[in-house]
C-alpha cells in the first residue's frame, strides 16, 4: 500500500461476515441495522447510490416533499433528472398496506409489511454505486398451509424533471416542464417514460430473481399506460402461484438517462442482470467504509452516531455526466451554457433538497471525510468546486457557493457579494487533505487557485483597506455589517494554511506574503473584533458607507467601523479556528454555553436576548458541530462532549441511522409539512462527531508530508 494512504486510521477492526440476501431477510447481526415502527407515515427516508437514489416515507409511500421544486423532491432521482414521482404495488388489484416496520441497513433500506392473505411481504430498496439505477426487491413468502394464487402489479408514475430550474426561479420548473410520454418498450419488456424533445428517459422493467420448484411466476407484461396531468403511468403484472412455506422474489429496476436512451438500456440491463450480487456488493463496500477509522467509544449513543455518520457520508456521494454550466444570477436568468463538463464527482449536501455540490458544505464536510478515510470523495469534491469555479469566476479564484447537478450556478459568482468565507475554507480543506494524505500532487493542483482566491478576497474585497474582506459569510440574514466574523477568522486560518503549503513547496514569496498577512490580521483581530460590552466577538463590523462588495450590508455612521452584535452562531468560529485568545475564548464560552445560545438539543442559529434580540432559535447540526470543535480546541473536553452528544442523540429521530440538518428546538419543530422540513440526512452533520472523536478525543494528528504522526489523547 502506498505510504501516503497508510493512515486510514483503522484503530480497531472488527471481523464482519459476508452478507447474503437471506441474511437481510433475517436481519442478521453480521452488519448493523436500525429499525423503527413508530410514526412511519410522517418520517422520510433515503436509499442512495452515487448515481441514483429514492426518497419517500417510511410507510412505503411517496407524498410530495421538498421546497426547491416545491412538493417534487420526492421519488426516484438519477441526477440531473427526477425519474419517477412514485410507485405502488398491488396484490389482486388491492394496494399493499402501509409498512409496519422500517429498517436502515448499510447501503439499503427495508420495509416490512403486515401479512396479506397469508403472504408475508418485505420490500428492499437500494441504488448500486456506479449505475443510475434504483432497484426494488420484493420478497413474498407464503406462510399459509395452502398454495397462494395471486396477481402482483407494479404501478410506476413518472415525473421527468431536471434538478433546475426551481419553483421560485425565472423560469420556473413548471414553465419548462412538459407532459411526459409513456410507451411499452419491447426491448426491455417494460415501460419507457420520456420528456418530449429531450433525450431524457426513465426506463422501468422487472424480473423474477428466484422461486422454488413448486412455484410459478408468470410475467404478463406491461400495460395500462396513460397520463395524469404532466405525469405518466403504466403497470407491470405477474401471476404468482406460491407453495406453502415458499418465497418468491421479484426485482424491479428504474434506470435513467439524460444523454442517450441506449445508455439507459445498458444501465437497466446491468441493474437487472444480478440484483442479489449488486446488493451483496453494496453491503460489502459499505462495511469496508464502516471498518475504516474504527474506534471503541464508551458512550453507545456517540458510538452509534460515529459509525452511522460514516455510512451517511458514503450515501452523500454524487456523480453526474454532461453538466452544462450556466450562471443563473441567483435564479433570475436561464442563459445558454458557458461550458460543458463531461463528468462531475463529489458529494451532495443533504436530502431531499440539497443533493448537489456546495463550496461551504464541502469544506466543513472534508474534516469528517478525512478523519474516517473517505479521501477520494473529499478530493473529488474539491476538484469539482475548483474546476467549475474557474470556468465561471475565471482568474479571481473565488469559490462558487452552489452548483446544481445539471450545471446551473445559483450563487457565488464574482458579481455577487458572497459567500466570501468559502474561498478561505477551500484553502483549509485542501491543506487538511494534504496533511492527512501526504498527497503533494493534490496540493499542487489546487495551489494556484488558492493563491488567486486569497489574494482576491484580501485585496479586491477590502475596499476600505482595513484588511478585513467584505461580503456575505455563512449567515444569510439582513442587518449584518459588510465585514463578517466567520469570513475574518476563516481568512486568517486559510492564510496560515497557504503559508504552510508554500513553505513545503519552497515558494518563499508566497510563504512570506501569506504568513505576513496572517500575522498582521491576527495581531489586530482582538482589538477589531472583541466586544467587551457583550463579552463576545462582534459577529459583524458595519462601515460608515455603502460598499459595492456588499451593497445591502447595514451602514452605521457613528464611527468608520462599528461593532455589531446580533448573537449569530458564528460567534463560535474564532474558537473553532483556534484564533481567539484563551482569556477571551473562556469569557465567550460562558455566554455561548448558556441559554442565550444553547438549548436542550443544541446550539442555536441565533441567540435570543429579549427584549433587544429575538433570535432564530433553531438548533442546527452545523452550529452544534462548530461548538463541539471550538470547545475541544481549548481543552474543554467535557463541554465538547456535550455538543457531540447533542448531535449523536438525533441519529434516529427521523430516518434510523441518519443525522439530520436541524433539531427539535424552540423555533423548529420536527415532522412539520414535508415541503418546509429541513434535511433528513445532511453531510456536514457528521463534522461535530467524526472530527472531535478522531482529532480531539483520540488525539490523532497526522502530518504525513513531514512524516509525523502525533497522538495526544
Image (cartoon, grey):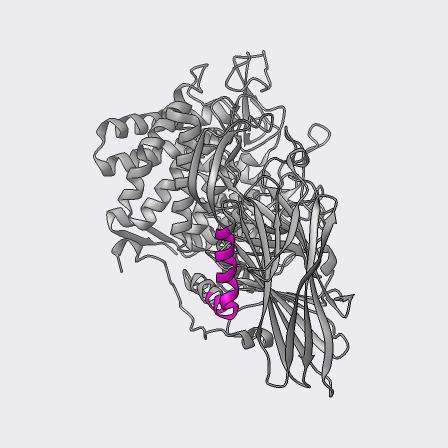
Name the residue nearer the viewer: 443 or 231. Answer: 231
In magenta, the rendered stretch is 262-281
User: In the rendered view, does 504 fall on the left or right side of 89?
Assistant: left
Q: How many marks?
A: 0
Rendered residue at 40%/68% (across/down): 13
Image quadrant containing the N terminus = bottom left
User: In the rendered view, does 303 fall on the left or right side of 597?
Assistant: left
Assess whether residue 275 is covered by the magenta stretch: yes
Where 633 sits versus 174, above or below?
A: below
The reply to whether residue 74 is in sight is no
* Chief secondary structure of the magenta portion: helix
Q: Position of residue 129 (x, y in %)?
A: 47, 57
Where 83 sits versus 533, above or below?
A: below
Name the residue nearer the viewer: 443 or 691. Answer: 443
Seen as rendered, the residue at the extreme bottom is 145
Name the residue nearer the viewer: 673 or 503. Answer: 673
Q: Position of residue 351 (x, y in %)?
A: 59, 48
Name the residue nearer the viewer: 220 or 504. Answer: 220
Task: Residue 479: name its quadrant.
Answer: top right
Where 469 sits versus 353, above or below?
A: above
Image quadrant containing the C terminus = bottom left
Rendered residue at 61%/43% (across/down): 195
Assess whether residue 395 is covered by the magenta stretch: no
Task: Residue 37: name its quadrant.
Answer: bottom right
The reply to whether residue 367 is in sight is yes
Amino acid at each position: 500500500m502506498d505510504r501516503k494512504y497508510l493512515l486510514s486510521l483503522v484503530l480497531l477492526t472488527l471481523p464482519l461476515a459476508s452478507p447474503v440476501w437471506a441474511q437481510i431477510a433475517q436481519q442478521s447481526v453480521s452488519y448493523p441495522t436500525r429499525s423503527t415502527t413508530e410514526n412511519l407515515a410522517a418520517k422520510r427516508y433515503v436509499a442512495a447510490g452515487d448515481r441514483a437514489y429514492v426518497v419517500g416515507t417510511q410507510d412505503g409511500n411517496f407524498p410530495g416533499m421538498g421546497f426547491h421544486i416545491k412538493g417534487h423532491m420526492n421519488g426516484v432521482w438519477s441526477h440531473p433528472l427526477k425519474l419517477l414521482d412514485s410507485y405502488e404495488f398491488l396484490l389482486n388489484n388491492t394496494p399493499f398496506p402501509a409498512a409496519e416496520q422500517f429498517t436502515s441497513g448499510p447501503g439499503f433500506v427495508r420495509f416490512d409489511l403486515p401479512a396479506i392473505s397469508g403472504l408475508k411481504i418485505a420490500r428492499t430498496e437500494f441504488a448500486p454505486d456506479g449505475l443510475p439505477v434504483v432497484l426494488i426487491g420484493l420478497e413474498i413468502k407464503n406462510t399459509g398451509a395452502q398454495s397462494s394464487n395471486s396477481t402482483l402489479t407494479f404501478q410506476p408514475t413518472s415525473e421527468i424533471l431536471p434538478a433546475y430550474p426551481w419553483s421560485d426561479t425565472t423560469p420556473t420548473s413548471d414553465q419548462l416542464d412538459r407532459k411526459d410520454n409513456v410507451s411499452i418498450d419491447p426491448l426491455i419488456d417494460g415501460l419507457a417514460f420520456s420528456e418530449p424533445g429531450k433525450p431524457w428517459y426513465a426506463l422501468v422493467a422487472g424480473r423474477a430473481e428466484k422461486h422454488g420448484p413448486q412455484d410459478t411466476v408468470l410475467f404478463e407484461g406491461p400495460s395500462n399506460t396513460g397520463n395524469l396531468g404532466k405525469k405518466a403511468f403504466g403497470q407491470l403484472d405477474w401471476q404468482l402461484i406460491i407453495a406453502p412455506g415458499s418465497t418468491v422474489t421479484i426485482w424491479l429496476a428504474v434506470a435513467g438517462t439524460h444523454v442517450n436512451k441506449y445508455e439507459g438500456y445498458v444501465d437497466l440491463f446491468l441493474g437487472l442482470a444480478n440484483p442479489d450480487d449488486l446488493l451483496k456488493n453494496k453491503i460489502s463496500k459499505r462495511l469496508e467504509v464502516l471498518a475504516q477509522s474504527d474506534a471503541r467509544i464508551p458512550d453507545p449513543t456517540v458510538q452509534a452516531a460515529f459509525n452511522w455518520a460514516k455510512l451517511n457520508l458514503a450515501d452523500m456521494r454524487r456523480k453526474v455526466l454532461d453538466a452544462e454550466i450556466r450562471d443563473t444570477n441567483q435564479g433570475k436568468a436561464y442563459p445558454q451554457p458557458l461550458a460543458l463538463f463531461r463528468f462531475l464527482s463529489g458529494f451532495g449536501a443533504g436530502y431531499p433538497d440539497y443533493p448537489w455540490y456546495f463550496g461551504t458544505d464541502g469544506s466543513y464536510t472534508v474534516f469528517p471525510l478525512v478523519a474516517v478515510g473517505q479521501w477520494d470523495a473529499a478530493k473529488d469534491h474539491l476538484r469539482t468546486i475548483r474546476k467549475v469555479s474557474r470556468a465561471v469566476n475565471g482568474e479571481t479564484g473565488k469559490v462558487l457557493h452552489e452548483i446544481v447537478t445539471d450545471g446551473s450556478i445559483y450563487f457565488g459568482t464574482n458579481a455577487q457579494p458572497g459567500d466570501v468565507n468559502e474561498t478561505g475554507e477551500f484553502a483549509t480543506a485542501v491543506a487538511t487533505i494534504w496533511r492527512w494524505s501526504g498527497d503533494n500532487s493534490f496540493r499542487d493542483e489546487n495551489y494556484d487557485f488558492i493563491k488567486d482566491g486569497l489574494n482576491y478576497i484580501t485585496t479586491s474585497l477590502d475596499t476600505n483597506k482595513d484588511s478585513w474582506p467584505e461580503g456575505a459569510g455563512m449567515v444569510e440574514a439582513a442587518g449584518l455589517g459588510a465585514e463578517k466574523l466567520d469570513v475574518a477568522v476563516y481568512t486568517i486560518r486559510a492564510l496560515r494554511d497557504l503559508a504552510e503549503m508554500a513553505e513545503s513547496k519552497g515558494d518563499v514569496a508566497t510563504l512570506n506574503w501569506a504568513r505576513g498577512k496572517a500575522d498582521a490580521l491576527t495581531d489586530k483581530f482582538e482589538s477589531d473584533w472583541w466586544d467587551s460590552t457583550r463579552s463576545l466577538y462582534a459577529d459583524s463590523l458595519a462601515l460608515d458607507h455603502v460598499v459595492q462588495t456588499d451593497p445591502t450590508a447595514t451602514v452605521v455612521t457613528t464611527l468608520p467601523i462599528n461593532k455589531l452584535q446580533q448573537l449569530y452562531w458564528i460567534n463560535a468560529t474564532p474558537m473553532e479556528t483556534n484564533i481567539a485568545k484563551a482569556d477571551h475564548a473562556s469569557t465567550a464560552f460562558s455566554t455561548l454555553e448558556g441559554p442565550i445560545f444553547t438549548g436542550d438539543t443544541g446550539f442555536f442559529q441565533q441567540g435570543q436576548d429579549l427584549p433587544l434580540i429575538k433570535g432564530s432559535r433553531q438548533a442546527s447540526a452545523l452550529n452544534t458541530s462548530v461548538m463541539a470543535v471550538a470547545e475541544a480546541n481549548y481543552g474543554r473536553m467535557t463541554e465538547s462532549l456535550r455538543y457531540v452528544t447533542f448531535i449523536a442523540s438525533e441519529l434516529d429521530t427521523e430516518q434510523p441511522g441518519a443525522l439530520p440538518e436541524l433539531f427539535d428546538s424552540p423555533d423548529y419543530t420536527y415532522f412539520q409539512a414535508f415541503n418546509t422540513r429541513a434535511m433528513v440526512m445532511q453531510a456536514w452533520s457528521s463534522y461535530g462527531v467524526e472530527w472531535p472523536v478522531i482529532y480531539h478525543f483520540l488525539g490523532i494528528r497526522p502530518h504525513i508530508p513531514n512524516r509525523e504522526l502525533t497522538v495526544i489523547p
